[in-house]
Image (cartoon, helix red, strand yellow):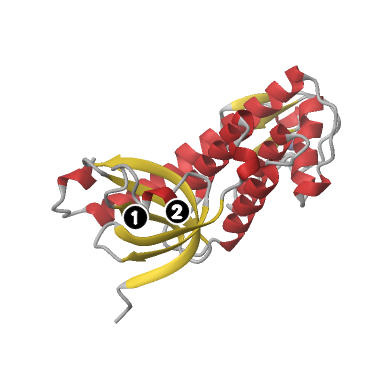
Amino acid sequence: MRSRTYRSRGIVLRQYPLGEADRIVSILTPEMGKVRAVAKGVRRPRTRLGGNLDLTSVIDFAASFGRNLDVITEARTLGQNIEVRSDLPRLSLALYVCELADSFAPEGSRSRELFRLTLSVLDTLGPAPDPWLLTRWFETRILDVSGFRPQIEDCVECAEALKPGDHLLDLGAGGALCPNCRSLGVGGKIFVSESAMRVLRHLQRTSRSDELGTPTLRDSLRDEVEGILSRYIRFVVERDIKSADFTRRAVRLEGDANPQFRR
Ligand SMILES: [Zn+2]
């Protein structure tokens, strides 16, 4: 019989209120993927548990297995990214990083790479010379580690190497189209200018965040790159991740006697 409790290191990704005084906390762990557990009584003032479950914090926690949701019994903060917390723009990027990790994290299976990636980006957001670029790199890497890397070096239809120029990125096909294949593809095409493609490739080819450098990018180009990644990610999350997650949750929640969990 498996043990009724477990202990792990984790990153606090999200929190949702539950009932009068509780919260559901979503925690990214290296060995169990995303854990969603109830923290009881933490919305009352001055609780010891509540003070150790801040968003973006790295914690050491213990929980007991529940039929649907586990229950957190202990939590201790290991790291809090003080530099990020004192800077509102960086803090909002850190919260976004956590939200994205929450969308991509599998439940109940090992996700060491995603854990390491999220931890390293949260650690480097504070001192990062270009936090915007680091966040775009995180988006690119999370697509990589989750198996959704867009193909932007060769045409996704005919596999010819793409020549310099503007391109169309086909969301459904998961990559860029060469001029000959523009009318093909699965649908949901986004325009990618030559300059934006250069930035996207730089992000994809950079395996370590400290090798990103500090390229000078004009605001309109930043907006374009951010928009492309955001649309691509939204497409992947809605088509593949949310639907799979929903199916898993629906199966697990079937027959649940507690109406609070049914929402
Ligand atoms: Zn082609």
Q: Nearer the viewer, residue 22 or 220?
A: 22
Q: Residues within 10 Å of mark 1 (few under 14, many from 20)?
A: many
49 left or right of 230 in image: left
- Within 10 Å of the Cα at label 2, are there few (<14), some (14-19), or many (20+) other Cα atoms? many
Q: Is residue 70 above or below residue 164?
A: below
Q: Position of residue 23 (x, y in %)?
A: 31, 45
Label 2, ligand 1: CB separation under 8 Å = no
Q: Quadrant of ligand 1?
A: top right
Residue 258 x, y percent position in the rendering: 16, 50
Q: Is residue 69 left or right of residue 123?
A: left
Residue type (three-letter) at the residue carrying disc 2: Ile
Q: Reply above or below: 16 against 57.
A: above
In which image quadrant can residue 113 be found? bottom right
Instruction: Give the mark nearer the N terminus: 1 vs 2.
Output: 2
Q: Is residue 119 visible?
A: yes
- Which disc, if any, is residue 256? none
> Residues at badges 1 and 2 in contact (C-beta under 8 Å)?
yes
- Secondary structure of residue under mark 1: strand
Look at 74% across and 41% down and name the residue there: 127
- Please report the residue visible at 25 percent of the width from the left and 43 percent of the height from the top: 21
Quadrant occupied by the C terminus: top left
Mark 1 lies on residue:
37
Q: What is the residue that sits farthest to the top in this orientation? A: 220
Residue at left offset 45%, top offset 53%: 27
Q: Give whichever of 146, 52 is nearer the camera.
A: 52
Asked if one can make out residue 192 in the rendered structure from this viewpoint, the answer is no
**Residue assigned mark 2:** 27
Does 107 sit left or right of 180 as displayed? left
